[in-house]
């Protein structure tokens, strides 16, 4: 029987409509959006019969097995908890929450409900990540010695709740590939803030920093990972990137879009073409690693700035659906999601305290 899914939030979230419609193990049963005109337009375009403007009404629908949440960051924790308490499996875009306490609440709700929770982190299903992961498993990287991640973005013009957001409160795109490749959770973090944003932006969340840079100690590992984030008033082309330095080979993300990543063998540098990994997916959704709902005439900033999120969307949808079908935890389950999210929350706390070391709670 197909997993019956409701998609909540239809901006960036609309990218997942054809994936759930065409996946052999799922059915897109309903969509939800507060704006009724926009809701009817998208539901009509994709022939989705059930549509809701009220999230509580959607959760009361007994035919829905799972919800995929793509709403604004401040809503993630409460909406995920409500869905879990209603007996639904939950996929949620990043981050899990904006406080450690809310991360704990989501984790507790998932465990009490005995339902799957998956944080839909795009970078750990990007072509670059899958390529480096394959290199690592084949022994090509050797022993990892250091990891570095960066996510720099200009959020001017985005919805108001983004204005002045602490950079590290949206850090999972830079944190996740490092911890996933190291196969270790974060144990503690030291972070420094640098520069200043305008008083108008600072007043929203009380965060003054233009850039935040963190050093993360990994649990049970000799490794340290470095992460840098910026969101406003810092000149830089958009980049979600990671670098892995091994004793045999190292990988660095391209510095400028289109340059191609670099692999180092000793001091010898070679630019590489990263392959697509559509072959890992059911044939019905393979085309969506290279295309989506949005195009040049109908663009969504998260998709265009992120270069299509590295072809990750069908991989994310596939993992979520298959985890439910196979009755197993998803790859980025509630424990992993809470750790990856808390790195950024604790990093910002460290920056506000002048660089004090802050332990990452256990979940």
Image: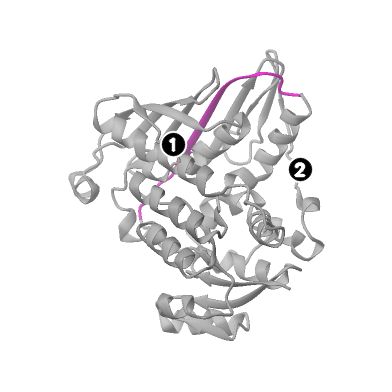
- Which mark, residue 71? none
For mark 1, does the 10 Å Cα neighbourhood hold few (<14), some (14 to 19), or many (20 or more) residues?
few
- Secondary element at image label 1: loop
Answer whether residue 99 is visible to the viewer in this image: no
In the image, is residue 223 above or below residue 300?
above
Q: CA distance from mark 1 to mark 2?
A: 36 Å
Which percent across, then down, holds residue 280? 78, 51
Q: Comparing marks 1 and 2, which lies closer to the viewer?
A: 1
Locate residue 221 relative to residue 75 in the image: left or right: right
* 68, 285: nearer the viewer: 68
Q: Residue at x 28, y 48 (%)?
A: 164
Locate residue 185 relative to residue 258 in the image: left or right: left
Which percent across, then down, holds residue 119? 53, 52
Q: Residue at x 29, y 35 (%)?
A: 349
Tell which circle, 1 or 2, labels the residue nearer the N-terminal end.
2
- Which mark, residue 275? 2
The C terminus appears in which quarter of the rendering?
Answer: top left
Which percent across, then down, holds residue 138? 79, 28
For mark 2, does the 10 Å Cα neighbourhood hold few (<14), some (14 to 19), or many (20 or more) residues?
few
Which percent across, then down, holds residue 15? 59, 65
The N terminus appears in which quarter of the rendering?
Answer: bottom right
Q: Residue at x 72, y 37 (%)?
A: 131
Specify whether residue 147 is painted magenta: yes
* 19, 257: nearer the viewer: 19
Q: Residue at x 73, y 67 (%)?
A: 23
- Which mark, residue 362? 1
- Secondary element at image label 2: loop
In the image, is residue 131 above or below residue 269?
below
Specify whether residue 283 is painted magenta: no
Q: Which residues are magenta?
A: 140-156
The answer to which image quadrant residue 199 occupies is top left
């Amino acid at each position: 029987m197909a997993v019956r899914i409701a998609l909540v939030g239809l901006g960036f979230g609309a990218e997942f409509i054809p994936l759930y419609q065409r996946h052999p193990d799922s059915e897109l049963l309903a969509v939800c959006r507060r704006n009724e005109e926009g809701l009817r337009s998208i539901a009509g375009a994709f022939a989705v019969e059930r549509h809701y403007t009220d999230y509580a009404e959607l959760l009361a629908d007994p035919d829905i097995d799972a919800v995929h949440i793509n709403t604004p960051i401040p809503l993630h924790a409460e909406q995920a908890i409500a869905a879990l308490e209603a007996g639904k499996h939950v996929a949620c875009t990043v981050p899990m929450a904006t406080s450690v306490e809310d991360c704990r609440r989501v984790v507790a709700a998932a465990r009490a409900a005995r339902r799957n929770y998956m944080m839909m982190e795009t970078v750990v299903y990007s072509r670059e990540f899958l390529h480096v992961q394959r290199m690592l498993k084949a022994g090509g990287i050797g022993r990892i010695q250091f990891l570095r991640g960066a996510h720099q973005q200009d959020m001017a013009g985005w919805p108001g709740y983004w204005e002045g957001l602490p950079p590290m409160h949206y850090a999972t795109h830079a944190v996740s590939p490092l911890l996933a490749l190291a196969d270790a959770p974060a144990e503690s973090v030291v972070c420094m803030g640098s520069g200043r944003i305008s008083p108008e932006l600072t007043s929203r969340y009380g965060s003054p920093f233009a850039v935040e840079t963190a050093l993360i100690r990994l649990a049970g590992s000799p490794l340290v990972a470095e992460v840098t984030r910026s969101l406003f008033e810092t000149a830089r082309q958009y980049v979600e990137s990671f670098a892995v330095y091994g004793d045999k080979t190292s990988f660095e993300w391209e510095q400028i879009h289109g340059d191609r990543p670099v692999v180092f063998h000793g001091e010898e540098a070679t630019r590489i073409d990263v392959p697509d990994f559509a072959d890992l997916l059911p044939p019905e959704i393979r085309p969506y690693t290279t295309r989506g709902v949005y195009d040049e005439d109908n663009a969504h900033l998260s998709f265009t700035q992120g270069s299509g999120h590295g072809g990750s969307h069908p991989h994310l949808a596939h993992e979520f659906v298959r985890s439910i079908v196979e009755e197993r935890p998803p790859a980025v389950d509630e424990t992993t999601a809470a750790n990856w999210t808390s790195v950024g929350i604790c990093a910002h706390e460290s920056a506000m305290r002048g660089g004090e070391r802050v332990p990452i709670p256990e979940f």
